[in-house]
Amino acid sequence: MSTDNPFAAPTTAPVPEAVDLTAGLGALDWAAVKRLRNASHSIRSLGALWMIGVLVCLFAVVAGVSRNSKPFGAFEAGIFTVFAALGSVAIYGAWARPAWGRGVGMVLCILNLASLPIGTIIGILGLIAYSRGKPLFGPGRWTHREVEARYRELKAQRR
């Protein structure tokens, strides 16, 4: 007779543990390096998208303030300027990746959730990338170049 309980709750595969920053990239397996590489590429892409957004905000401020018809007032120009400044900080955080860059990026992704429908998609994908990319930020971070080199090394070994 079987000892398995047919009424037991289903089991799942164990959740992978957090990435150990002190072990280095050499200790990571193929799947972990691939996830980290994808997160790094996504974060860089978010920086490029935010750069476009900053340029659009600045263009809107310049075009809106310089017109005689005044399509929007000082309040709207101030909001565009604040978003351009926040976007500029997030761009620096996405490219240089200081310890605070991850938090600023996540805040901007949360703000993007409100702009339907494309901003929502960008915000969700950005939150996923920033949550997976924790080892990419801070003083002991792994640079994009290091992650990319380790990925190529493991990819060559798999062939």
Image (spheres, rainbow, N blue to C red):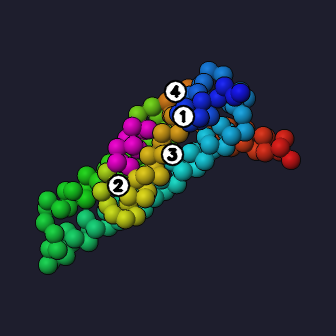
Q: Nearer the viewer, residue 23 or 44?
A: 23
Badge 2: residue crowd in 10 Å (few <14, some 14–19, many ≥20): some
View extreme (front): residue? 1
Q: Which residues are magenta?
A: 101-110
Magenta span contains residue 75: no
Question: Magenta stretch mostly in which secondary structure?
Answer: helix
Determine the CA span between mark 1 and mark 3.
Answer: 37 Å
SS of the residue under disc 4: loop
On residue 129, the disc is: 3
Determine the CA span between mark 1 and mark 2.
Answer: 44 Å
Q: Nearer the viewer, mark 1 or mark 4?
A: 1
Q: Amino acid at mark 2?
A: Asn
Does residue 86 appear anywhere in the picture? yes
Name the residue carrying label 1: 7
Q: Residue at x 67, y 43 (%)?
A: 34
Q: Nearer the viewer, mark 2 or mark 4?
A: 2
Q: Nearer the viewer, mark 4 or mark 3?
A: 3
Does residue 142 appear anywhere in the picture? no
On residue 68, the disc is: none
**Above or below 121: residue 105:** above
Name the residue carrying label 4: 139
Give whichever of discs 2 and 4 has the lower sequence position.
Answer: 2
- Position in image of residue 24 (x %, y %): 67, 26
In the image, 146: left or right of 109? right
**Above or below 76: residue 87:** above
Give whichever of discs 1 and 2 has the lower sequence position.
Answer: 1
Cβ–Cβ below 8 Å for labels 1 and 2? no
Badge 3: residue crowd in 10 Å (few <14, some 14–19, many ≥20): many
